[in-house]
Image: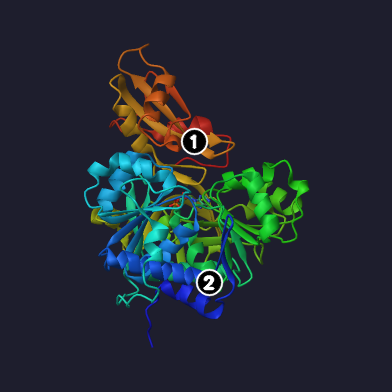
């Protein structure tokens, strides 16, 4: 028998098996699985009544919230595609994404309605504007989520007749191009990723997950589905704050959390740890970059909690590899524990050279991580040429450079793609360069990622002025701040006389990077 793998199964199971169990804690609000299922059905019916049909795009722009969680299941219940937006982007990014994805309905947290109002006239396809949360009345031009859903029917919406290869979400990610690309994830992708999360991260019915990860980031790495399917409890965290994190871990008896290394750092550096009585032994799953080995040791030795490193990309739903202490990895080999790890079930990985041939499995030969798996995305939304560049001969080329050993365990050493990862967020160097080139005093520029204690990497701009002496680094930073989201702006801009180029005029970014990374555990390609 073949039954399509549809993500709605996860909520259906939890609500059927554990209706009275605590599903969501969001501030003072506590929802059981029966409550969550009802809220989802009402939102799904409200969206249907607005004419949202199978394949239509609905976006959500919100920090983590119970509304966000509900939007995943309500859209998939009616066959719509969710487009979760990164709330740290600026209005022009949102405008681009909403138009590119052809979004019909925007679901927006009350704090973000003003930013959407600013671009309203240029949003070509949006027909409905729904605001979530907030204490006072909704701003004019918006409908209130709670009022709208209160009036909607409770019955399960009719089956939209979905196939497992239908797209469930489009997650925009900053890649090597100046514009973000829409990663189409299918039901099947997300389903199998959730299974691997459950299996490899040991997710159980009694897990309590603290949302230290933004839900927009690759659907909370799949936790939206994996934890729900097992009937665990979601503890919502709207913003990262050491005290709030420790309070919630203590009060809600948190057992599990996923995060970028920058969040792990905030947790480790929180000064009042001793004031909390934490009786659980949470598992912390880290990805986005390898954290310093000392973080792993501190988490396990000082706090007695468990550390797990994983590696993946939005394009792979995301889980590709996982690193646990096991037969191959000693529990106290902190450096080894911080690495990407071994392939998850059903994930074939090869580290390949520029001719697409596997490099030696000797821990030193560097190649590109390529993968073949059911978690690999369907393609970039309306960008078939970009899709064909990334998936060739049945293998997805990640743009990450790694070494591998005889067991197939990989260690990421650099990136081939021109992407900077700062605090777990992808930033396209090309996008920053595009912004800088708009400055009339700029002749040439290059943006690279440089090491940063807090964020892992931050962007550095190297700029050749048209006329010597007429530009300063501060001018460039101020110029970027007016055009780009804050987290994308260069933390430093240097004025230089020239940029290194090959004889054929190709910019040699590796030469620029060398001076900043030479003492680090990162090689240059
Ligand atoms: P995103 O698509 O935003 O999730 O970013 C994916 C990128 O993050 C990958 O292509 C890698 O460059 C990087 N990344 C994710 N996990 C790790 C890890 N464990 N170690 C090193 N780099 C990582």
Count residues near mark 1 (Cα–Cα under 10 Å), then give few for <14, some for 14-19, many for 20+: many
Q: Residue at x 39, y 68 (%)?
A: 42
Depth check: give the residue in front, 98 or 269.
Answer: 98
Up/down of 22 relative to 418, above or below? below
Depth check: give the residue in front, 78 or 255.
Answer: 78
Mark closer to the chain start, 2 or 1: 2
Depth check: give the residue in front, 141 or 69.
Answer: 141
Image position of 240 (left or right of 158): right
Image position of 116 (left or right of 87): left
Disc 2 + disc 1, Cβ < 8 Å: no
Mark 2 sits on what residue? 33
Q: Residue at x 40, y 20 (%)?
A: 475
Residue 51, visible in the rendered structure:
yes
The image position of residue 95, as x and y in percent, is 29, 44
Is disc 2 placed on a helix, strand or loop? helix
Q: Residue at x 37, y 41 (%)?
A: 114
Task: Kindly report which numbered mark, 2 or 1, lies closer to the viewer in this rendering.
Answer: 2
Mark 1 sits on what residue? 458
| Quarter of the figure with the N terminus | bottom left
Residue 292, visible in the rendered structure:
no
Up/down of 467 relative to 143, above or below? above
The image position of residue 419, as x and y in percent, is 41, 43
Q: Which mark is residue 249?
A: none
The image position of residue 181, as x and y in percent, is 32, 50
């Amino acid at each position: 028998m073949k039954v399509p793998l549809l993500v709605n199964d996860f909520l259906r199971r939890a609500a059927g098996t554990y209706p009275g169990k605590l599903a969501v804690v969001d501030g003072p609000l506590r929802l059981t699985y029966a409550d969550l299922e009802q809220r989802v059905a009402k939102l799904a019916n409200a969206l249907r009544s607005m004419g949202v049909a199978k394949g239509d795009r609905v976006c959500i722009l919100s920090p983590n919230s119970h509304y966000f969680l509900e939007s995943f299941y309500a859209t998939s219940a009616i066959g719509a595609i969710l487009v979760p937006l990164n709330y740290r982007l600026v209005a022009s990014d949102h405008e681009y994404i909403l138009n590119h994805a052809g979004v019909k309905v925007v679901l927006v947290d009350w704090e973000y309605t003003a930013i959407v109002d600013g671009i309203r006239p240029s949003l070509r396809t949006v027909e409905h504007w729904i605001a979530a949360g907030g204490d006072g009345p909704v701003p004019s031009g918006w409908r209130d989520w709670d009022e709208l859903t209160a009036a909607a029917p409770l019955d399960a919406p009719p089956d939209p007749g979905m196939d497992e290869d239908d797209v469930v979400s489009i997650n925009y990610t900053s890649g090597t191009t100046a514009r973000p690309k829409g990663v189409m994830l299918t039901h099947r992708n997300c389903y199998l990723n959730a299974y691997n999360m459950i299996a490899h991260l040991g997710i159980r019915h009694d897990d309590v997950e603290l949302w230290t990860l933004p839900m927009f980031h690759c659907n909370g790495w799949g936790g939206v589905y994996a934890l729900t399917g097992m009937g665990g409890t979601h503890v919502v965290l709207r913003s990262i704050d050491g005290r709030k994190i420790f309070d919630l871990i203590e009060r809600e008896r948190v057992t599990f959390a996923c995060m970028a290394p920058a969040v792990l750092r905030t947790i480790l550096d929180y000064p009042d740890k001793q004031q909390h009585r934490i009786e659980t032994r949470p598992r912390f799953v880290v990805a986005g970059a390898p954290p310093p080995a000392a973080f792993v040791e501190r988490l396990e030795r000082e706090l007695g909690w468990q550390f797990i490193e994983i590696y993946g990309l939005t394009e792979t739903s995301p889980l590709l590899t996982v690193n646990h202490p096991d037969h191959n990895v000693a529990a106290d080999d902190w450096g080894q524990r911080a690495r990407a790890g071994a392939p998850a079930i059903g994930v074939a990985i090869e580290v390949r050279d520029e001719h697409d041939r596997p490099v030696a499995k000797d821990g030193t030969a560097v190649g590109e991580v390529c993968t073949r798996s059911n978690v690999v995305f369907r393609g970039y939304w309306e960008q078939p040429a970009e899709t064909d560049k990334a998936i060739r001969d049945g293998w997805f080329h990640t743009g990450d450079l790694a070494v591998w050993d005889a067991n197939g365990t990989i260690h990421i050493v650099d990136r081939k793609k021109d992407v900077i990862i700062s605090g777990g967020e992808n930033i396209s160097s090309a996008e920053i360069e595009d912004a800088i080139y708009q400055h009339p005093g700029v002749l040439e520029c290059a943006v690279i990622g440089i090491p940063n204690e807090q964020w892992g990497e931050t962007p550095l701009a190297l700029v050749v002025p048209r006329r010597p002496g007429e530009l300063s680094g501060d001018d460039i930073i101020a110029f970027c701040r007016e055009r780009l989201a804050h987290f994308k702006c260069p933390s430093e801009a240097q004025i230089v006389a020239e940029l290194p180029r090959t004889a054929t005029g190709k910019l040699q970014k590796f030469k620029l990077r060398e001076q900043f990374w030479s003492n680090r555990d990162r090689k240059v390609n």
